[in-house]
Amino acid sequence: MKFNIVVLPGDGIGPEIIDQSVKVMNAVGNKFGHEFNYEYALIGGVAIDEEGTALSQATIDKCKKSDAVLLGAVGDPRFDDPQAPIHPEDGLLAIRKELGLFANLRPVHAYPSLFDHTNFKPGVLEGVDFVFVRELTGGLYFGQPKKRWTEKDGRWAVDSMLYSEHEIARIVRVGFEIARTRKKKLISVDKANVLQSSRLWRQVAVEISKEYPDVELEHMLVDACAMRIIQNPRYLDVIVTENTFGDILTDEASMLGGSLGMLASASLAGVPKAGNRTLGMYEPSHGSAPRHKGLNDANPIATILSMAMMLNYSLGLSKEAAAVEDAISKVLADNYGTYDIIGKGSTKVTTSRMGDLIAERV
Ligand code: IPM
Ligand code: MG
């Protein structure tokens, strides 16, 4: 089959890691007989430099016409001043909103070969394999009012954790659909003991659960979830939660995988159901790591795992996705690692070598 992929390398290590995804995809194309056409475009700091905006209309249009979007990373310390008029991250938030990417899937997997590399006891990590479904286009990130102002008594600021029942219902459905393909257990994370938006969230989750009698629904408070993630992560399977809670919990959970460089992510514009293809953007959960830019030492695995999610959710190529995931497990079992995941007895490799090793094993 033929597919059109928009590639947004972005800033920092973005171009280096995205090259590895393209390399592995080409290996998939050769092995399974698919043709991937790549169209490159700008986002983030490089887009501010070239186009004067962190996300141009031209880039948005290309993405909307594509089968899927691959993103490297966004962020550049040159724009770190909070007073700066535009930030590279604006491009990321804008593309999520423009493409309607409301569902962010972030799988957490503890690879046995990386147990040593974490701060956890092996007994805690054994069998850890769960997935976050993070709401991505609502809550504190986008809710109005969102502003700063000054009064006689000083400066004020507000962000709003605003949710409509429609927004809650569609993300909770994504949680149920994913739970259906796994252990049929969904944990909805909120702060319903304090927040109004969470009380509505919980109520809607209960209503939607009637559509999924085969899936068990559990509610968990976000603080308790933060604790559970490190106390007994094996208990977790599918977790659905709002935008900010998901942002924080996914960074925490990434430590179970040994490195932030292992955490993949898919951002989808539709509910993933068996046999459905939906527009999506695929990016590692880590940032642009500016200090590693151009050093060819960053870990490309999160980016390549994200590309595997693309094969699955946007291109309907689940066999091919599994081949990529297997290739990564093999490379790790063969004890190769980039600087962030090497332990005793393992061989340290560069970003591009890691890409080669994975491509060879597809
Ligand atoms: C993430 C990142 C982004 C977010 C930032 C870069 C805006 O932390 O994807 O988790 O907060 O969503
Ligand atoms: Mg984050």
Image (cartoon, helix red, strand yellow):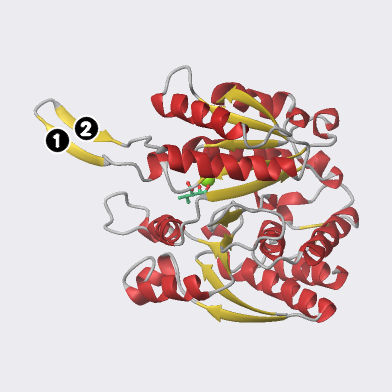
The answer to whether the beta carbon of the residue marked 1 is less than 8 Å from any atom of ligand 1 is no
Using the numbered discs, state the Cα–Cα distance from disc 2 to disc 1 in whole angstroms: 6 Å
Q: Quick one: quadrant of the C terminus?
A: bottom right
The residue closer to the viewer here, 352 or 29, is 29
Amino acid marked by disc 1: Thr
Q: Position of residue 79 (x, y in %)?
A: 36, 58
SS of the residue at dot 1? Answer: strand
Residue 249 visible in rendering: yes
Which residue lies at the image location 42% right of the left edge and 23% below the top edge?
A: 195
Which residue lies at the image location 72% right of the left edge and 71% below the top edge?
A: 352
Q: Quick check: 150 left or right of 249?
A: left
* Residue that mark 1 sits on: 150
Q: Position of residue 222 (x, y in %)?
A: 55, 26
Outermost residue to the top: 193
The answer to whether the beta carbon of the residue marked 2 is less than 8 Å from any atom of ligand 1 is no
Q: Quick one: quadrant of the N terminus?
A: bottom right
Amino acid marked by disc 2: Trp
| Few, some or many residues within 10 Å of mark 1 (<14, 14–19, 20+) | few
Q: Are marks 2 and 1 in contact (CB under 8 Å)?
A: yes
- Please tell me whether residue 58 is drawn above or below residue 118 in the rendered image: below
Q: Position of residue 290 (x, y in %)?
A: 52, 59
**Occupied quadrant, residue 299:** bottom right
* Residue that mark 2 sits on: 156
SS of the residue at dot 2? Answer: strand
Which residue lies at the image location 86% right of the left edge and 46% below the top edge?
A: 113
Q: Quick check: 74 left or right of 258?
A: left
Q: Position of residue 91 (x, y in %)?
A: 41, 61
